[in-house]
Image: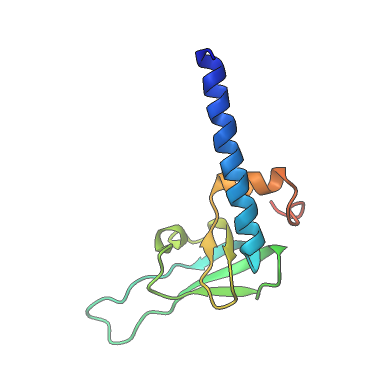
Amino acid sequence: MHAGAAEQHRGTLSRARIDAAAVKTFAEARYVAQVVVLRAPRPRLLAEKVAPPPGLLRVTAVIKGTVPATLTVPLPDPCLAYFQKVGARLIVSARSSREQPVPMLAVTVDSLRRRKLGEWRHLR
């Protein structure tokens, strides 16, 4: 196998892995939705007597499942960095209604769109 064919073969394998992971994530998700960050979550400062309000996400489009109109992002949140830019549009998923929303990677979203899993035509 020459160098170009080997590189193409490696790309095919990684794409197959990405597709398999995307399908698994989609199948396990209770909901998948596009959201806009309305309020960024932030940790409590030492000088503050009360905790700040949690982050707030507004659902703009539902791709799979039933989602409330707004989602909260309480702290501690492992995805804190993703929700810091107010106005940012993200695709998020969660395995249960109690689980915090988790942003999906662009390659995962591309894979789901390519496989036509979910309702994507009403997204921007």
Q: Residue at x 53, y 73 (%)?
A: 99
Q: How many marks?
A: 0
Q: Nearer the viewer, residue 113 or 59?
A: 113
Q: Position of residue 34 (x, y in %)?
A: 63, 60
Between 63 and 18, the one nearer to me in the picture: 18
The furthest residue to the bottom = 49
Q: Which residue is located at x 51 percent, y 71 percent?
A: 100
User: On screen, 51 above or below 60?
Assistant: below
Quarter where residue 43 is shown:
bottom left
Instruction: Please indicate whether residue 83 sits to the left or right of residue 63 in the image.
Output: left
Q: Quadrant of the N terminus?
A: top right
How are the residues colored? rainbow
Q: Is residue 105 left or right of residue 20?
A: left
Estimate the x, y position of residue 29 in percent, counting from the top left.
62, 65
Residue lying furthest top: 2
Could you tell me residue 92's position as x and y percent? Answer: 57, 61
Residue at the image position 62 percent from the left and 55 percent from the top:
24
Q: Residue furthest left?
A: 46
